Image (cartoon, rainbow, N blue to C red):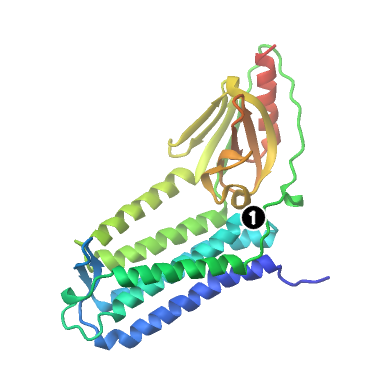
Amino acid sequence: MSTRTPLAVRRFTLVALVLPTIVTAIAVIVQALALPHVPDPIAIHWDASGTPNGFAAPWVSLALTAVIGLGIPLLIGLSGLNGLRRGDRGTTYRLLGATSLGVSTLLGALTTSLFVMQVGIEDASAAPDLWGPGLASLIAAIALGVAGWLLQPHEPYRVSALDASAGTTEITLGDTERVVWLQRTQIARSGIIVLGIALLVLVAANILVVFETPESGVSTGLVILTVLVLALLLTTCAFHVRVDEHGLSVISVAGFPRIHVPLAEIARAEPVSVNPMGEFGGWGLRWAPGGSGFGVVLRTGPGIRVTRTNGKAFTVTTDDAETGAALLNALGARATR
């Protein structure tokens, strides 16, 4: 039996992890070689007119290039590798790999070009504007991103043995019988790791920038972004799922967000096997075109998918999805008797 790693996994690893690491390493090395020849501080931020208005020690550029240039590929790589190794496929994985390479290229090329163009300048306030290097970096990022897309095989999402629909359960209810079904669902360990890495990368970037240039617009933006990621982590990592005579309720353990599908609006409910990355492009509160619709998808595995009377779908991943779906169908049938 062959144990050769599938082509999709090998190419994703190359595009999402190996090549971005090489690009980042080259950028850091070039900046390190130019370090003795740039002013201290250097310009790290420009206003809309192209005039430098933010400055920091030269080592900040190297540190940011390394931390973000390696952190983003690691974040994306962990998002995709587990699913690919498990047998999942889909355009999302291909896009993630291309994005990893493109973003790393944009960051590495931009920080390095802005760093190198200050070689020989005594005062960083006299640094040239960033429009030329910015445009060149963007073109390079798009080119390598497209190359990363083409390097990966085209393997659209498909239902595999792991994605087969779950079995069916039937529940019969009396006219006056009251019943409630409760579950708690939380994000998979791999999702927590990915979000944790994203938060750590942002915290590291904050430490490097905020303390060095506390008054710059860059530091303000990083603080806001970090707060948003933390809020996202706290509000979408776990949900309570409830089925009763009122319908399906999915409520964050933080109290918000809250999703409720009234029983009268449910045409049918079914247990399904959910692939967050392949179907929805990731974890959390997601929307996917086609039949999957909107969903609270926190892990790979069983879930309840309800189809509303208007044809729209809602999906939530949860244990014992067969019972939850069957109860919704039984409650709906009783309500129409």
Q: Can you give x and y, in whole percent of width and height, for residue 163 in the image?
A: 72, 48
**In the rendered view, would you say 1 is above or below 155?**
below
Q: Can you give x and y, in whole percent of width and height, for residue 73 in the image?
A: 49, 67
**Which residue is under mark 1?**
90
Q: Can you give x and y, in whole percent of width and height, for residue 93 in the image?
A: 59, 59
Query: Which residue is painted at 67% across and 52% down in the image?
Result: 157
Q: Can you give x and y, in whole percent of width and height, for residue 241 in the image?
A: 56, 34
Q: Is 243 positioned to the left or the right of 104 in the image? A: right
Q: Quadrant of residue 274?
A: top right
Closer to the camera, 251 or 314? Answer: 314
Closer to the camera, 215 or 186? Answer: 215
**In the rendered view, would you say 175 is above or below 276?**
above
Q: Secondary structure at mark 1?
A: loop
Q: Quadrant of residue 77?
A: bottom right
Residue 245 visible at all: no
Amino acid on which the number 1 mark rests in the picture? Gly
**Image quadrant containing the C terminus:** top right
Query: Which residue is painted at 31% across and 58% down in the image?
Result: 222
Marks counted in the figure total 1
